[in-house]
Amino acid sequence: MRFSKVDCCRILATLFVLLLWHAMLCPTGAAPSEASRADRPKDRADSVRAIVSYLGLSEGSVIGDIGAGNGKDTWVFAEIAGERGKVYPEEIGADMVESLSKTAEEKGLTQVTAVLGCSEDPCLPRDSADLIYMNRVYHHFAKPREMLRGIWRSLKPGAYLVVVDQRRGTLRDWVPRHIREEKHHWIAETTVVREAREEGFTFFACPDHLWHEKDPFVLIFRRAEKLKSPGQDPDLFEPVSVEDCCHLFLPVAGQYQNPVFIALGQARELMAPILEYSSGEGLDIILEEWATQKEERPPLPAGVSLPCVLTDNGDPHLKDEPIDVVFFLDSYHLLFHGKTLLGKIHEKLTPTGRVYVLDRRAKQQLSRREASHRRKIQPKMVEQEMTDAGFCLWFRGSRVASDRFLLVFGKARSEKAK
């Protein structure tokens, strides 16, 4: 059977739509199969096209290319946007902007307008872009939060921010931000996710399989539609009534001897009433999954004072004293180094010790990495990880808030387990 050119075009178009539909249906953040790894884009230009297609953007789109350099990606965006679209390659050096403008003119790309930005703002037109993209640029930001606010203002409500950078997982180069502007110190995806969220973006996906190289991460965010201005977290946890629920975390009898807290957000307010029932000094473990600077610490509740330690590839370097209780309070979902951290806790926990996990419930199945980025997790995943670390589920606690669940674990199986 022979096909006409028109038939062939129709068949190819149908296959493309089916592939795109499949990509949209696949759980975002899920690890690609071996087959999909083999089908990675062949080069950088194909990767850019794949990302734009994944987002459903095409001719007529308005795209910002932050830190465009010599325009390697800009010219691909210009091809996609077409004459009806607009592309804004941005650089902070006047010479680079002039070079981009000259090349665009030579190529006859009237849709390309080079923009001179600064360290604090890309200076793109407000509420204009459908997509703002940066490739190996974020790790150079000396003032990332100011830059994110500028990007937020440049995007249309609901539009996309794509960050491609080098280091998956947690931060390893703990250098001051002002040093990053001139030198290469790779950033961590956990840092990008936290800073973007706190400046008004919602996490959308981490489709690394759309990139032609294996090492970089690809993070996609959206400008939160309901926010009127940047600098706010658009996905806050529901508040917890400390007064109403603190009894769930107190000892059944006596006092705690050496409590350990791994707590974030408003849930840290539970530390104060718990410490009132503790005879020991206690410890505040700071997750490297959360910290963006080595000395950064979340504030302690009023009247609370206790030592703290930052994890190192999951190791909190605990002292020799045994631990009788550990509280993961709105923090467990973040774990990238959970196997190591849980192993260290298991070593120090007394035979009758407890581990409390209070966290936000994910209704859909998420990969471990996506659970961290979306700040929610399925209770089943927590139970499985704790079981793998040698713990037993003791009981499922009362609901502290409509979006939370509470699980309590021990080393030995309890008769109270349900």
Image (cartoon, helix red, strand yellow):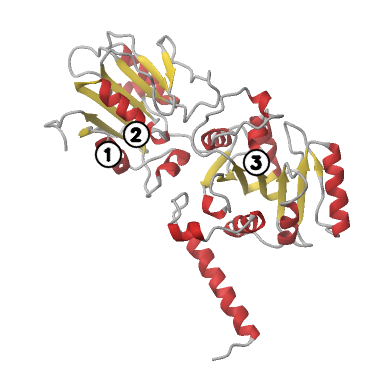
Where is residue 287? Give x, y as percent. Answer: 44, 26
Image quadrant holding the N terminus, namely bottom right
Closest to the observer, 151 or 241: 151
Q: In the rendered image, which residue does mark 3 sit on?
A: 136
Tell me the quarter of the picture where residue 188 sits: top right
Looking at the rendered structure, the kind of residue marked 3 is Arg
Report the Cα–Cα distance between label 3 and label 1: 37 Å
Closest to the observer, 224 or 182: 182
Secondary structure of the residue carrying numbered label 1 = helix
Report the Cα–Cα distance between label 3 and label 2: 30 Å
Closest to the observer, 286 or 244: 286
Where is residue 43? Give x, y as percent. Answer: 63, 56
Q: In the rendered image, which residue does mark 1 sit on?
A: 383
Q: Earlier in the sequence, mark 3 or mark 1?
A: 3
Looking at the rendered structure, the kind of residue marked 2 is Lys
Secondary structure of the residue carrying numbered label 2 = helix
Looking at the rendered structure, the kind of residue marked 1 is Glu
Kindly identify which numbered label has been placed on residue 339.
2
Tell me the quarter of the picture where residue 281 sits: top left
Location of residue 10 with respect to 187 vertically, above or below: below
Q: Residue furthest left?
A: 415
Badge 3 vs badge 1, beta-carbon distance below 8 Å:
no
Around disc 3, counting alpha carbons within 10 Å, would you say few (fewer than 14), some (14 to 19), or many (20 or more)?
some
Image quadrant holding the C terminus, namely top left
- Regarding residue 225, the answer to whether it shows in the image is no
Q: Earlier in the sequence, mark 1 or mark 2?
A: 2
Where is residue 245? Give x, y as percent. Answer: 30, 25
Secondary structure of the residue carrying numbered label 3 = loop
